[in-house]
């Protein structure tokens, strides 16, 4: 009976409906913020890892360029690196800076030799992956700049200390990841083709080893294990100690930018929690003011303050639950639409992706809901003290 009377009063007050709408908007904004930011960070991290892996083992003498000092990599070393927990693959690679030149144009690039094609196979837009000697996979933006198409040949030039090496490659496929910073830099070829540019002998020399993980949460743990396993190791010639670097160390500017997103999320969530809490406080105060006659009657019948406060807090909790429920339904619904349709676009040249990426981070969403409900109820305890100040005599006089 008490709840029905309060419900009728609530429905007669637009201000309470506004408070409920504020709660719904706050929850859906927080859910969308988490889904978009987590999705954005995961997408960018996957693209960066696709070009350079999660962890690289390179020469200790590397100069932070793509012209790396070669290191010796044995089959036993690859087997050991691939045996660590959470390591999905350990594969040698070769990078060699150079230049592509046509009759009318030229473009600086890095030729990368690899036999691990999962990432580029998922981003190929035309043609096939290179399999034979002197075949390359070119990015579509680079092909457009140079006026090249699949099936054509292009000359490449590589500068060493003593000479300029010229090679002629056949373009067998085009890829595009939307990550312009790398799409306009990397040209892919089979490992053996790039390895010949190092003048490597039978000992097996490469620019390094790329290590891909199945879970980014273990990045630092795996990197530390590999570091301690290789820190005192030297090749057969007694030099070129191995150096371990993570994708965060390879691309500090990109990940510093991504870390700023975490601060934005924190700020948005705090603001939305404050707004939602303020809306619910307003709604509870309106319920109390509308229920003053009921409060006076209940107290006159012998109800204590705790009992009366429980009635109004329960009604407010029902409002919070309704707001959180609808906020989740609408927020997750909008996220699902974007996840399946990519309806909202982005400028790839600026954001490295062509659409707003979405990931359903269920753990964070559950924590957000619990935090929202808990803090809202906690905030409501203070305004509910108004009930203790209302006496039956004052209500009767007011009536």
Image (cartoon, grey):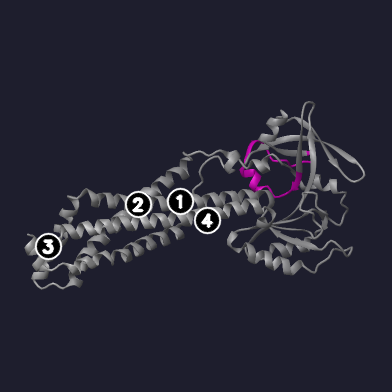
Q: Residue at x 62, y 48 (%)?
A: 47
- CB under 8 Å between callouts 4 and 2? no
Instruction: Give percent across and percent down for residue 145.
Output: 70, 31
How far apart marks 1 and 3 lie (CA) works out to: 41 Å
**Which mark is on residue 262?**
4
Mark found first going from the N terminus, 1 or 3: 1
- Span shown in magenta: 111-134
Residue at the disc numbered 3:
294
**Is residue 29 shown left or right of residue 39?**
left
Of mark 2 and mark 3, the one earlier in the sequence is: 3
Element on which disc 1 rests? helix
Residue 123: say if magenta. yes
Cβ atoms at labels 4 and 1 below 8 Å apart:
no
Which of marks 2 and 4 precedes in the sequence? 4
The relative height of residue 302 versus residue 54 in the rendered view (above or below) is below
The numbered mark at residue 327 is: 2
């Amino acid at each position: 009976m008490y709840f029905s009377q309060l419900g009728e009063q609530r429905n007669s007050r637009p201000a309470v409906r506004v408070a409920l709408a504020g709660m719904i908007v706050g929850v859906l904004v927080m859910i969308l913020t988490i889904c978009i930011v987590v999705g954005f960070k995961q997408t960018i991290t996957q693209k960066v890892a696709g070009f350079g892996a999660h962890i690289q083992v390179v020469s200790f003498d590397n100069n932070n360029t793509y012209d790396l000092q070669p290191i010796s990599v044995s089959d036993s070393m690859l087997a050991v690196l691939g045996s660590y927990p959470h390591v999905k693959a350990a594969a040698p690679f070769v990078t060699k800076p150079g230049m592509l030149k046509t009759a009318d144009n030229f473009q600086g690039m890095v030729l990368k030799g690899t036999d691990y094609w999962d990432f580029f196979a998922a981003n190929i837009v035309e043609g096939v992956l290179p399999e034979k000697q002197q075949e390359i996979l070119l990015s579509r933006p680079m092909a457009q700049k140079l006026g090249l198409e699949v099936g054509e040949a292009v000359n490449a030039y590589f500068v060493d200390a003593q000479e300029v090496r010229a090679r002629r490659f056949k373009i067998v496929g085009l890829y595009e990841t939307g990550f312009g910073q790398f799409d306009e830099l990397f040209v892919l070829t089979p490992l053996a083709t790039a390895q010949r540019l190092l003048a490597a002998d039978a000992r097996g020399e490469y620019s390094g080893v790329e290590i891909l993980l199945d879970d980014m949460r273990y990045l630092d743990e795996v990197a530390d294990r590999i570091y301690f396993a290789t820190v005192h190791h030297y090749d057969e010639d007694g030099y070129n100690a191995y150096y371990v670097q993570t994708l965060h160390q390879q691309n500090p500017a990109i990940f510093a930018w991504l870390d700023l997103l975490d601060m934005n999320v924190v700020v948005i969530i705090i603001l939305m929690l404050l707004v939602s809490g303020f809306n619910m406080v307003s709604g509870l105060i309106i319920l109390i003011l509308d229920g003053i006659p009921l409060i006076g009657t209940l107290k006159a019948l012998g109800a204590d303050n705790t009992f009366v406060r429980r009635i109004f807090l329960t009604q407010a909790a029902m409002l919070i639950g309704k707001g959180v429920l609808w906020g989740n339904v609408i927020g997750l619904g909008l996220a699902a639409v974007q996840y399946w349709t990519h309806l909202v676009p982005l400028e790839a040249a600026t954001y490295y992706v062509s659409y707003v990426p979405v990931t359903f981070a269920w753990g964070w969403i559950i924590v957000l809901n619990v935090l929202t409900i808990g803090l809202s109820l906690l905030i409501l305890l203070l305004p509910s003290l108004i009930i203790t100040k209302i006496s039956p005599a004052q209500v009767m006089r007011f009536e």
